[in-house]
Amino acid sequence: MLEGVEFTEGTEREDFVGFKVRPKIIVYPKDENDVVKVVNYARETKTPIVVWGAGTSLSGHLMCEGCILLDVSKYMNKILEINDIDWYARVQPGVNLEFLNKKLMEKGFFFPPDPASFFLCTVGGATANSSGGMRGVKYGTFRDWILALKVVLPNGKIVKVGEPLRKNRGGYDLVHLFVGSEGTLGIITEIWLRITPLPKRKVYTILAYMNSLEDTAETIVELRRKRILPEISEYMDVDVIKALNKHLNANLKESEGGAFIISIEDDYLTEIKEILKGREFIITEEEEAERIYSIRAQAAIALRAESKYMFVEDIVVPVSKLIEAIRKLKEIERKYRIRMPVIAHIGDGNLHPNIMLDDISLAEKIFEEVARIAIELGGSISGEHGIGFQKAKLLAEQIVSHNGEEVLRIMKGIKDLIDPYGIMNPNKYVELAYNTWEKK
Amino acid sequence: MLEGVEFTEGTEREDFVGFKVRPKIIVYPKDENDVVKVVNYARETKTPIVVWGAGTSLSGHLMCEGCILLDVSKYMNKILEINDIDWYARVQPGVNLEFLNKKLMEKGFFFPPDPASFFLCTVGGATANSSGGMRGVKYGTFRDWILALKVVLPNGKIVKVGEPLRKNRGGYDLVHLFVGSEGTLGIITEIWLRITPLPKRKVYTILAYMNSLEDTAETIVELRRKRILPEISEYMDVDVIKALNKHLNANLKESEGGAFIISIEDDYLTEIKEILKGREFIITEEEEAERIYSIRAQAAIALRAESKYMFVEDIVVPVSKLIEAIRKLKEIERKYRIRMPVIAHIGDGNLHPNIMLDDISLAEKIFEEVARIAIELGGSISGEHGIGFQKAKLLAEQIVSHNGEEVLRIMKGIKDLIDPYGIMNPNKYVELAYNTWEKK
């Protein structure tokens, strides 16, 4: 059945945060026809399929035991077209995001969403996860930039969802159903990404040393009140700065209140200076701005070296609730006497408290308490990392408390409608959330 | 069952383009609890429900015979909240879009999508239809600006889909399923709209008299090649100009090649002047720019007065195929010896050829031929007007030829999953497309 498809016996892999992937076999499809063969084989042998791009997922999306691991990074990694009239790029799922952006920039374009793993991750993985990034505050996440997808469905049929058009009212919007579906509905084999011209305006990046995380949150609220929309607005606390200095020679000031990084178009410069008055800050451009951006992108990597176990949280709260969320995070730190360094896309209320532990036994409890801060404050347990295996139970809690049980039932109904065989990354995400809730 | 719900015996209504709405009763719910009562009544009596906002739909979305017409315009028409920290507006479905934008502007915000009916339509209707508008070329359509919805489902349950957050990975994206669902999945009772600060930059609106529609299409391609993203870029042909002068005293030059309206930020001005060289054009700001914008918005109304029957088309083609599409439209005009004046959001490839007929017998044939131009050229039969009753057969053609039959089956499956009772605006849109295709 797998005739002509390259494969090897499965050997164990580990994703970026250490979740184990233990496949029965690993397949390396050369094209969508190979993918169809694999899907048919999976369906007929009732074997789960998990897709591997670069393994940078953070919430156990790829965890499996005895699955077929479909690795798109080996062959299905090409840019198929960059259309400079219709303003889209058509790519295979295994293409590296940074590589794509380099090619786009040569032509005067860029693709805005920029997960911190942009130099490692694949476009397919980031699409399946609807990833975000630093530019999210202005440009949104992957879901805002995908026009169409080619997908091999669990029944082995090849379909396209959406059209490579900015405007299209051709039926229910299935594109957004597949973006962020974490490999549970089908296998993405081609992606049409909306691209946009490189900004014409001069952009400054300001590195400010703040009084505290609360002080930064208050500054964000002030920016909102003044109707200022930055290009990026990031925060790293002092522990993050120390780790960056130690492991990456970042050469940042180890200021107790942490660092606020904000990029803005030139005509906001006067206002920003006024807002930041009283704090130490430097205004940078070009290479130095790039360096700061790149340091920030590697913050989680530096931090990881600091602790035996690290659990990366990814909660979102409404910006108006940032200060309250931060206070609750501090309470958890005190209660458990742990370090929980914060990296944050603070401008859109997306906080990454990193739970650092020597003793893993407390992990789940703390992890859940942090996530529940978001649920309580009307936020979300995930802004960009997704649900995978790790957050399924919390997803059920969030949906039932914010949206209604019926929403969980509809989501499960959609999973069953499209994957009645239960072969696509099963027992995770929506399905696991539903099953956990049903058992209660 | 309808205890406490205000209703009247049904009297016939007509939508904007003349489709008949012949309800059994018209209900005027005061809140979502009233909506639940109506839905339960509809389900138990197996009566279809159609929602009425302002009746500006263009493709027979509202057509019905013996239905319950649920009119949200009488009571459910409030702005519930404008949140200037979290940057959203929360509204009821019956609120007028222009009224909302006036209130937003007072606070320094705006909501970008601007269907030409903005001064008439309701936010609920435009959400259910995922409407577009002139600002679509830069800002996209309704689907890009809806954060969350409250919905009464066909089973009578009240749910929320999505969260009022810029980033949220809380399960499959159901928001985009309901946006553009044309009343076939549930009844929207509250909408969280993303809002954004009023642009800080100076914007100029240029009115240029072009050599022809093809000339304008070539100019659009040149803009794309030069990586220029305008705020709006519209076209009206000479017949449209004449109708505007006649019925609305527009005072435009009746130039044979038609008029191109382009708004751009100030730093593109030099480039635009260069691109438009050789054509007559005027550069406007503020009141005069507003006047031109408003004239353009009323173009379809002026045109309607010119003919006994008018069918408003709404095709999209890739920008790279604009010139080819225009040539094919001209062939149809010649073949049937008809006038088909063109209004276009030309910058995003969205053309509105208006089929003007004294003899209605040819209508369907011509309408379908025009739509098939879009299908052939890899475009869409609708960019912003939606499918309703009128375009269901064409929707089936588009999906089967571009996306695959299986996509139509999944869409129908979603309809059956959420509305197994078949009471929500039945026998239109996806359901009708599927049924038409199945019968073949």
Image: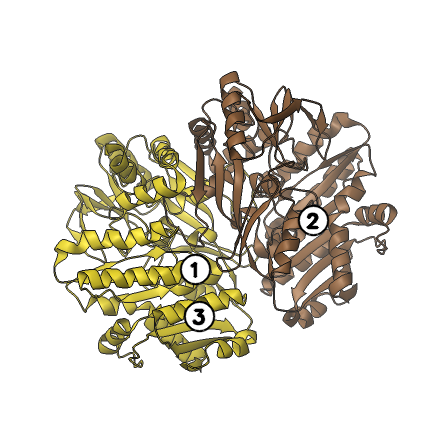
Chain colours: A yellow, B brown
Specify the label residue A319 is tagged with.
1
Q: Earlier in the sequence, mark 3 or mark 1?
A: 3
Chain identifier of the residue bearing label 1 in the image: A
Q: Residues within 10 Å of mark 1 (few under 14, many from 20)?
A: many
- Where is B216 relative to A222, above or below? above
Q: Closest to the observer: A32 or A273?
A: A273
- Rendering coords of residue A413 (x, y %): 36, 32
Q: Closest to the observer: B281 or A140?
A: A140
Residue A97 placement: quadrant:
bottom left
Q: Amino acid at mark 2?
A: Ala
Residue A207 shows in this picture? yes
At numbered mark 1, what does the secondary structure look like: helix, strand or loop?
A: helix
Residue A230 shows in this picture? no
Q: Which residue is mark 3?
A: A219
Q: Amino acid at mark 1?
A: Val
Q: Which residue is mark 2?
A: B344
